[in-house]
Image (cartoon, helix red, strand yellow):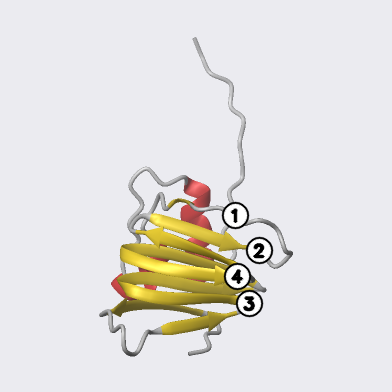
Amino acid sequence: MQLKGEAFFNATPNKQKPFIIDVNDVQVKVVGTSFNVKSTKGETEIIVETGIVQVTKADTTIELKAGQRILFEAVDTAAKVVASDDKLYNYYVSRTFVCDNTPLWKLVEKLNEAYDVNISIRRTHSKSFR
């Protein structure tokens, strides 16, 4: 399957017919899991919610487990696996913005994307009174 854009998958493993997603120059092989794949401006992001996926780019295969994410940037830089620290990636599936301990800038970024708006955060400096 060739992906453009973003999709959330909840797949059951089938060794006889593996579920494989091609996005940009990255291949995602499902091992039995739920996960999100997003392609924007040549960047590819994979976030695993449950289970495991195998991600291959060039000659390198990385196994992602639940709670992990990886980002391949448009320019060919080394990607690294990090913890997925929020649940904002699946707002379009759940219709909920889960943002416990999420920085405001991340929430604003998702709101801009979800509603095609341009919310900006402006810092104001105020003097504290003693």
* Residue 116 visible in this rendered orientation of the protein: no
Q: Which mark is residue 57?
A: 4
**Does 83 sit left or right of 27 as displayed?**
left
Pointer 1 with pointer 2, Cβ within 8 A = no
Question: Which residue is disc 1 drawn over?
Answer: 120
Q: CA distance from mark 1 to mark 3?
A: 33 Å
Q: Earlier in the sequence, mark 1 or mark 3?
A: 3
Q: Nearer the viewer, residue 72 or 101?
A: 72
As drawn, the residue found furthest toward the left would be 12
Type of amino acid at the residue the image marks with label 2: Glu
> Tag 3, which secondary structure?
loop
Q: Measured from the top left, where is residue 124 in percent x and y? A: 61, 36
The CA span between labels 2 and 3 is 11 Å
Label 2 sits on residue:
73
Amino acid carrying label 3: it is Asp
State the separation of the CA atoms marked 3 and 4.
6 Å
Q: Nearer the viewer, mark 1 or mark 3?
A: 3
Q: Nearer the viewer, mark 2 or mark 4?
A: 4
Label 4 packing within 10 angstroms: few (<14), some (14-19), many (20+): some
